[in-house]
Image: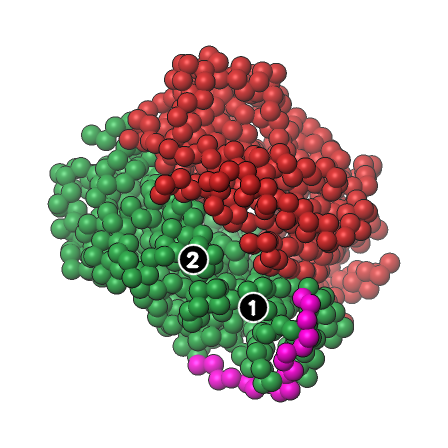
Chain colours: A red, B green
Amino acid sequence: MKYDAFFELAKSKGIAESQIQISRSNSLSIKLFHHEIDNYKVADSQSIVACGVYNGKFGFAMTQKLNKDTFAFLVDQIILTASTSEKEGIAELFKGSEKYHKKNVFNKELASIPVEKKIAVLHQIEDGLFAYDKRIVEVEEVDYSEKEISSEFYNSFGLKLKQKSNYYYFVGAAEAKQGEEIKTDYEFFGDCDFSKFDPKPFIEKIGRKAIAKFGGIQCASGNYPTILHSDIVAALVEYYLHSASSDEVQRKSSFLIGKLGQQIASKKLTIEEKPLTKNIYFSYFDDEGVATYNKAIVKKGVLQTYFYNRETAKKDGVQSTGNGVWEGAKIGVGFSNVFVKPGKASFDELASSIKEGVYITDIAGLGTGMNDQSGDFSCQAQGFMIRDGKIAEPLNLITLSGNLLKMFQDLKGFDNAVELKDSSISCADAYIKAMAIGGK
Amino acid sequence: MISKSLALQVLNAALATGGDYAEIYVEQNDSDVVMLENGKVESCGGPETYGAGIRILKGLRSVYGYTSDLKEKSLLALAGKLAGAYEGERAITVTSVEKQHVKEINKLQVHYKDIPVQDKIAYLKEWYQITSSVDPRIVRVQNALISNLKQIEIYAAEGPVAKLYENTEERGRVIDVAVAASEQGQIENAFAGPGRFADFNWFKNVLDYKAKAKDVGEKAIMMLTAKECPSGRFPVVIANGWGGVIFHEACGHSLEATATAKHLSVFSDSIGQQIANPIVSAFDDGTLPNEWGSNNIDSEGHVTQKNQLIKDGICVGFLVDKFNARRLKMDANGCSRRESYRYEPTSRMSNTYIAAGKDKAEDIIKDTKLGIYVANFGGGSVEPTTGEFNFSASEAYIIRDGQICEPVKGCTLIGSGKEVLMNIDRVADNVDLGQGMCGSLSGSIPVNVGQPTIRIKEITVGGRGGKLE
């Protein structure tokens, strides 16, 4: 094996166990502005992450510089970093899982589709947006990007794992103007099968959303029955699941401490992590080499498990759930391919019982407005009033505030409009009994 | 990092199809993070980033590519691939490279890598001791010393003689986070993150880190008793320093050429127009010695500058990079920045602040009957096209009858840049700066935000605390 020299060097320097991961990627992105290719970008890069156990402690190294000195650099760094570690216990690397569920998610055809065809679609989107409505005065962004990623994993126990994937995505953003009022909206579509992209609904969605925002006002501050668009549900679920990280729980930084097996949310909430789903977020091993598997995290409102890596699992006397991911120089906890079980009702059916409420379609500032330890959040929002079960006047420059734990306890249900988001979370619109809206 | 002869070959390959400007940005970035969890070393070390970006401009078009392989074959292949995006005949042949003098305005005595790791650990343990001993309800303290040593070569050609700029950037930052938990299971946190383009001596000998570490612990405990912030529209007084994030979001991003050049900003046509209350003047200054957002040169080799953006409420300038300068027909002014070689550079802020006014901070508070005092922010974001922004306060209080009263949590301020700048009705004389990371098109970069204490006479405040009384 070509990395034997690394393992031999590591062993000769006293690194009992070691692991090496090599990532390579190449990408292309094209942006259009006013019918011209405004920006064209190509890239290829590689990086090596290595770790090992030295005197019972865990050491780490990472470089993008590949030359004859790379292995020596990695070994020296592992020794240096392990020598300063004050973590309790004896570190051990993973030998390997009994079975791995490898699938081919690489689409060979994507790279062979001529660039001209991809550029033609960009023109189609730009033209389509300008033609959608005369109030669309600018197409701010029409981008196409594609990327191929390969990763290899080897350890000194002889474990070899490889994965190759590719994907593309389109982004469109338009500016609409009516009088002095300016509104913007954007849309994202990603997949690995180029034939799945249909520009027509993509264009219509951007145009419709931007135009619908005109005349937005602030409602009176207060608590309202609230429907959250699936984009917002996905953003909030991501923080909710962050609190299900065993690492955060063990460090007393999660509102889900001591809640395993308990009813933490409405019975309408079921969340599964399905890393083995065959899509662009597929992954069959984690950064420790542990085989991933599909599992329920919350089932009918009951917390089934935390996400574990090997270290946190050992502390709780359980097995790793295959959620070990690199977080800087240490293995942390992460997740991907999350499915939130939808409801059966349509949006109209979900909204029909709301006499006066709000439908939140956009939020901004959640990154800084979220206290992910307490689950309290407050952010900028826009959307529509709901009156007598129907979408009414647009709302702009309002705030949405809540607490994640309380919000999912107040969940009345989801509609059936499931979408897979670029955060790898798949979910529908959610109806929450009441949320705090700030306005006038 | 690459030889002049290789740079010449790459530049000429890049210019083969009629490009009028070619640039190679070569970077080696050695990062180091020493991280402690409850006083014990959790991890240590950081990535070694290495690579080059090649950019070719032709009129109003730009192509960019990067690679982490700096061998001749790889760089020439990348230059050829990028040049292939244009059609045309060569207009420039580069024949020589001339090294440019780069004045060092941010001198460092000692590199972080030369400080023994045990000294860094001992320093962080002091922070931990101080923060954690504030109160037994502090259940977690996470702290880190982050340093980056970035060595850069820029080869830029728009004629037969290419210019070579060599620059070294080195910054350090301490992060201190305290988590406090009440017996009822409530969890709150507080954070400090002082950073400088300066060496370790500044952190040890200039920064009053003992006071900062204590403050982090005290703030986390205080938040356990904070009530939910009320919502509605009312006066807000914003403290000096990191409070300047409001100007950064409400106005700064909208004055970057990356937004104004394509008329994608609310301020695209604002030069010469009044966009703020006449008591407001503002600058972006990349030359402040050793400040977090400062640099000797920008990512295109242009010397950094002090740029006035607003003078007595009138918009007098944008932040302009080389590429967007073409569309704007303006000169670049030393503000082109990027996170790393993986990003094409564009106009970005450095140290951006509202200038001192004539008021006194205490008078502004005294003259406010009912409102909110925001002492610190978590951060914010803006949509430059509409100018609509948001900020989250990490430390805020009710002002009642000119007095700062009880703390509140979960406070968000929202508004539009045009409205909020006109609504600033008091500006104090106590300018200070605060450090943050700014994310935008060319990645995440260190920036200072700053201001004196200011008052916004009315702004929308969001929270779960009902009406302000």
The residue at the point 15 percent across, 56 percent down is: B359
Quick check: is B102 in the magenta stretch? yes
Q: Which residue lies at the image location 51% right of the left edge and 84% below the top edge?
A: B100
In the picture, which quadrant includes the C terminus of chain B? Answer: top left
Magenta stretch encompasses residue A290: no
SS for callout 2: helix
Looking at this view, is B246 or A16 the one in front? Answer: B246
Please indicate whether residue A293 sits to the left or right of residue B240 in the image. right
Q: Earlier in the sequence, mark 2 or mark 1?
A: 1
**Residue under label 1:** B59
Which residue does the image show at 22% across and 61% down from the upper left? B312
- Number of numbered discs visible in the structure rendering: 2
Residue B431 appears left or right of B285: left
Q: Percent position (x, y) of residue A319?
A: 70, 34
Image vertical order of residue A321 relative to residue B285, above or below: above
| Mark 1, secondary structure of its residue | loop
Where is residue A432? Give x, y as percent: 47, 21
Three-letter amino acid code of the residue under disc 1: Gly
Q: Image quadrant of residue A81?
A: bottom right
Q: CA distance from mark 2 to mark 1?
A: 18 Å
Residue B76 in sight here: yes
Question: What residue type is disc 2 on?
Answer: Thr
- Is there a contact, CB below 8 Å, between mark 2 and mark 1? no
